[in-house]
Amino acid sequence: MKRWMRSTLLTLALVALASSSAFAGMGFQAGLSLDPDDFIAGLNWTLDPLAKNLYLVPSAEVGFGDVTMFLGNLDLHYRFQTNSKLAPYAGGGATFAYYDWDGGSNSEFGGSLLGGLMITPQIGLEAKFGLGDVPDFRFLAKFNLK
């Protein structure tokens, strides 16, 4: 089995295990990444709070464009208390990235700083700034089911 497939399956299995015991919600996300310039789509899971306003949010994404990429993310979100219906959050996380292009493939590990805004409990926007050998920037629209 190819190395990227083993890594992807392991990442998805870990996310599924983590999600099953403390599952709070699931959603879809889609957007754009810069360097590589790709369209990305994926799934995210919100786990029960670790502490007041602190949430673990694993996700998996696939990107198409300059290269094909598979991303596994383990993010931590801090949700700010507001008197508004808008729910801003900030955080960071770790990312495993697998890149596949015509001339070969490569896997990398890096991190990200992120910020987002939930417009409603189901719809939000998020920006991620890459640290290390992961996409430099990602902008995502998020659609939560729960």
Image (spheres, rainbow, N blue to C red):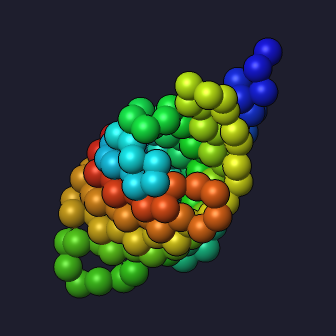
- Left or right: where does residue 12 sit relative to residue 65? right
Residue 101 visible to an observer of this rendering: yes
Q: Examine the rendering and report whether any part of residue 53 can be seen.
A: no
Q: Residue at x 30, y 68 (%)?
A: 117
Q: Residue furthest top?
A: 1
Position in image of residue 77 (x %, y %): 51, 68
| On-image quarter of the N terminus | top right
Residue at image location 40% in from the left, 71% down from the top: 115
The front one of 48 and 144 is 144
Quadrant of the rendered image containing residue 6: top right
Q: Nearer the viewer, residue 26 or 65?
A: 65
Residue at x 71%, y 54% (from the top left corner): 109
Number of marks present in the image shown = 0
Of residues 13 and 100, the one nearer the viewer is 100
Dividing the image into 4 quarters, which one contains the C terminus? top left
Q: Quadrant of residue 28?
A: top left
**Image-quadrant location for residue 51:** bottom right
Q: Residue 106: x percent and y percent?
A: 69, 39
Where in the figure is residue 127, as x and y percent of width and height? 37, 64
Name which residue lies at 54% across and 37% down: 69
Residue furthest front in the image: 103
Residue 66 versus residue 5 in the image, above or below: below
Residue 19 drawn at (x, y percent):
61, 42
